[in-house]
Image (cartoon, rainbow, N blue to C red):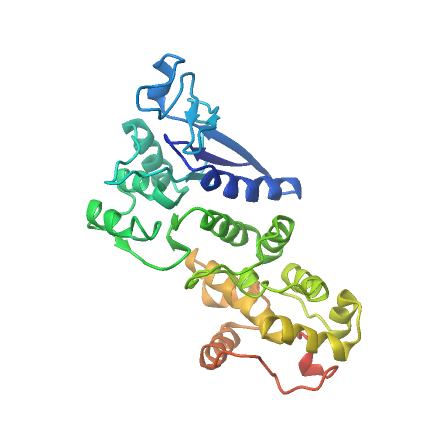
Amino acid sequence: MVRIVFVLLPQLHLLDLAGPAQVFSTAAEIGCDYVLHYVSQPELASRPAARSDDGDDDGDGDVRSAQGLPLRADVAWPDLDPADLVVVPGSRIAQPPRWPRVHPETAERLRRHHRDGGTVASVCSGADALGRAGLLDGRRCTTHHELQDEIARRYPAARVVRDVLYVTDGRVVTSAGVASGIDLALHLLAARHGPGVAARVAREMVVYARRNGDQHQESVMLRHRGHLDDAVHRVQDLIDARFTDSLPLATLAGAARCSERTVTRLFVRATGLTPLRYQHALRLERADQLLTRGATAEAAARAVGFADARMLRRIRTQTERRVDGPANDGAAPGSATSALPRP
């Protein structure tokens, strides 16, 4: 059982919480062993049930959201293991910046979980809580674009990355504003369970469409899902779930419920890639995730379906050299090279 613990700070934004919570809740519904917990800060437990003077919180562990909805949370944290995840959703930040209170015990909990081998994450202004715990020092991070200068000022040892959806630096993961928390949660899900599970959750939540802005950190599964072709989505679902396997073109055509000649044409038109290049992109992304977790190049290559590390490097080089635009592998539909072989 993996615990996903959301730390509710005063004036939190509902979508900062609800987006990631929906991702992990949906993952649990399809078989991932997740249990969600919601905790508030210890100082709330001793307050009277009446609303506080600044309107930040109610008594008995309740936290008032920025949208006015009170949320019930536990004051006591569950016991955590290194596999568990702690997420700090963002809160409303007034101008001039007035940051939500972060109790010293909350900061210590975040610091301790990371020190014990766990992952901590933030959405939007939640990065400030990680900063107060000392977890941004010497690390790359991001936050809402309107708060980036302030975070850089408050935590000069942090390296604030601008114009991205989320940043992963070891076991500290930060995301930009509001809806990017969904992207962050899907990324963490893909890192733990592979792109197939994350893509299934994404499709359940209907979050394929690309949003405005420079999305350097967007995952492969979302980058190529901004279309409305259900036949191609079915093919992508199959490749996402079995990206390490050899998938003949006939198998893909069966998923699309069309001919072998048609499936390649539809796929390129919808995604800008052939099925083979899409599979390679998934493999490379998963290999990068394994490498950042300490796997050797050889082990990562074999885990994602490549024959060896040399093949992994060759495909990566080819991908990096390729110009953007509709792909064409130069293979006739139905030929061996237009299928999805195990290299």
Instruction: Please determine whether, in this image, residue 4 is positioned above or below residue 266.
Output: above
State whether residue 342 appears in this view.
no
Q: Residue furthest top?
A: 48
Left or right: where 324 falls relative to 132: right
Q: Is residue 181 left or right of residue 110?
A: right
What quarter of the picture does the C terminus occupy?
Answer: bottom right
Please provide percent x and percent y for residue 131: 28, 42
Q: Nearer the viewer, residue 96 or 19?
A: 96
Q: Is residue 289 visible?
A: yes
Q: Position of residue 273 (x, y in %)?
A: 59, 75
Relative height, residue 175 to residue 331 (above, below) = above
Residue 267 point in image, percent of width and height: 66, 73
190 on left or right of 157: right
- Relative to 107, does residue 319 appear above or below in the rendering? below
- Picture quadrant where residue 240 is located: bottom right
The quarter of the picture where residue 321 lies is bottom left
Q: Relative to the observer, which residue lies in front, 304 or 240?
A: 240
Figure check: 201 above or below 65: below
